Image: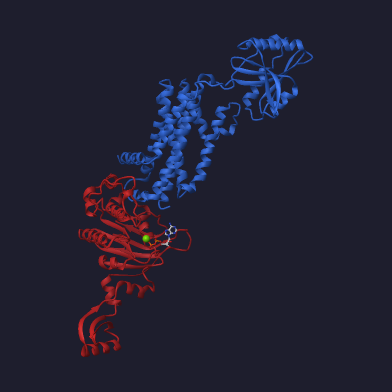
Amino acid sequence: MISVKNLYHSYNNDKNYQVKNVSFEVNEGEIFGFLGPSGAGKSTTQNILTGLLRIQKGEAIVAGYNVRDMSKEMFNKIGMSFEQSNVYSKLTAKENLDFYRKLFDVPTRDSIELLKLVGLEGKENIKAGNFSKGMKHRLTFARSMINNPKLWFLDEPTTGLDPSIAANIKSIIKEKNREGVTVFLTTHNMFIADELCDRVAFIVDGEIKLIDSPKNLKLQYGDKLVEVEYVKEGEIITEKLSTVLEKDKKSLQNIISRYEIRTMHTKEATLEEIFIKVTGRGLI
Amino acid sequence: MKLFYSFIKELKLASRGYYFYIELFVAFLILFVFLFAVPATFDSKSSEYIYLDMPKEAKDMYLEEILYKDIDKKAEVVKVKIDNEKKDALLYITEDKKIYVLNNKEDVIDIADKERKTSGIIKIDDENNVKYEYYLQGYESQRLKNLLKILHVEEADTLKEVMDNQDVRSISTNYELLSDRENILPSVLVFNGSLMGLFIIAAYIFLDKKEGVIKAYAITPSPVWQYLMSKVGVTSFTSIISSLIVLIPIMGFKPDYILLLVLLIVTGFFSSSLGLLIASFYKNIMQAFGVLYVVMMLMILPNIAYFIPSWDPSWIKIIPTYFMLEGFKTILIGNNDFIYILSVSGGFLITGIILFVISNERYKRNLLE
Ligand SMILES: Nc1ncnc2c1ncn2[C@@H]1O[C@H](COP(=O)(O)OP(=O)(O)O)[C@@H](O)[C@H]1O
Ligand SMILES: [Mg+2]
């Protein structure tokens, strides 16, 4: 669905690139995530792929169209939700969607149905300018699905949303993906990446450091940990112990033989811990 | 069809913003002022300051001649302020002029020098020829200078003959054909229509930039030019409405509205495209304000030439509003100079298209800026 080779981008048109030698492929039907801290170049890459930024150096094929000379037709097949919501504040939620529908040449979804989907039912006749930040974000998100896109770009789809709304958005993304929609998303939230993505690319300072599935990464990089909770002299104690390190293995045996065990589970390293290990950087 | 929907959406947006109402309000305000405050014709008699440098008999004869043209056949003794001093003068009021006859040569020169009025000395030389000496201000048009020259070239044998042959020509043609009130209308049309359009479309663009909706539009199959054109459509539409609000009650059905619409549309298109282009270089209205202001002031300059026919430097003709004014005036006079109107309209259409195409390229290229 997407094929990117040696992509570079510099906002000042100099050698100080904000996106450096980025190459990756997104397969049809998968959810592919760009995970990286803020300022890493995620949005820049996405904007080049959707033609919002002019491609400078490198090659990119998106939904069968070369980004260098993309045709407006391509936009019938793709949808994009923005990091910063951008809707007409003087139009109502429904008017915003109704107008947007008219701009496509393919069948579009009913505005009311979409508003319902993102939890904005009953709000259709309120001007978007009177919406809260989260509501505007959901409206922007709903708009990106209006043309039933085959390829869906999502820039920080859940950032800044209430957990319950974020959960709703995540389940919509999963559902669309199950229907066959290919998703390219950017996030600095490892839970999103972990939970949604079939594969993630770690990106820092405009460079991709690694691409793999969260599961593989954990197998490969995660030290096996055991979290054990036991009672020692009437007190409950919790400890995280490695199943690899000799010292930890010994103390684990010791705990098991001497104390009353309350709970014990193996614990995988989080994607964030792996990210830090690979890139030497945190996600904030 | 998409263009039509975009236009309707823009109209909806415009109707929910306040610029739209400001424009309509201003139109009604102008109409109100015109109908109730501006007299159809105000005192526009031109004033002439002269000194008669000639023997008494000749002078008396000349004054008698002027008196004959005076409306009440009486000369008034008045004071004329020259360089903060009050000087005596005789005032004759004729159909179209106020003639002040001053008492000495110095006053003539002072009034030209200190009060910036055009004045003249009329004298008779040894051969009994009448000589005219004018004191001009330096900015008078060549046309006026030529006119003054040819006015008096013929040598005459007698004073009487000169006076009888004296030819009064109006400096601008058409001038008498419109009432004073009507004469201001072209300026109103240019100001309320085009200049407001230029400013308002830029304001709309900056509003959209702020809301980021241009980006959302850019990722649809609809071309950017339609987005821009729908904005041009709305600003032109509102400027036509506000122009008609002022025009119809004042001019009735005298002017040719078809020609008028053509000129309103193309000038609206031209100035909106200019506004689009200017807006494409800036992120917000504060940054663009300086340039918008300078452009609008330049566009207002030709109004001065329009109201002061004697000031008409040739460089003013490179400012497009000059032709807007002339075009609207030609239509309002009603002599239906199709060729002139259509060529002026064609000029605005072509330059408008060029500006629009450049703007379109710029917006396509720099959507995120
Ligand atoms: N319009 C712009 N002009 C100049 N620099 C920009 C612009 N947008 C982003 N940048 C810079 O490019 C880098 C990458 O930004 P971005 O792609 O937005 O990061 P991310 O989406 O990963 O948070 C950052 O250093 C940012 O400051
Ligand atoms: Mg970003």
The image position of residue B342, as x and y in percent, is 45, 27
Confirm whether residue A281 shows in the render: yes
Tell me which residue sits at (43%, 20%) in the image: B254
Give the number of callouts: 0
Chain appearing in red on the rendered image: A
Say which quadrant the N terminus of chain B sits in: top left
Tell me which residue sits at (39%, 55%) in the image: A53
**Closest to the observer, A128 or A169:** A128
Q: Say if A218 sits above or below A258 in the image.
A: above
Horizontal relation, residue A22 to residue B64: left or right = left
Confirm whether residue A71 shows in the render: no
Split into quadrants, the picture shows ligand 2 in the one at: bottom left
The hue used for chain B is blue
Tell me which residue sits at (63%, 14%) in the image: B167
The image position of residue A105, as x and y in percent, is 27, 46
Q: Residue furthest front?
A: A234
Q: Quadrant of residue B66?
A: top right
**Closest to the observer, B290 or A150:** B290
What colour scheme does the image use?
by chain
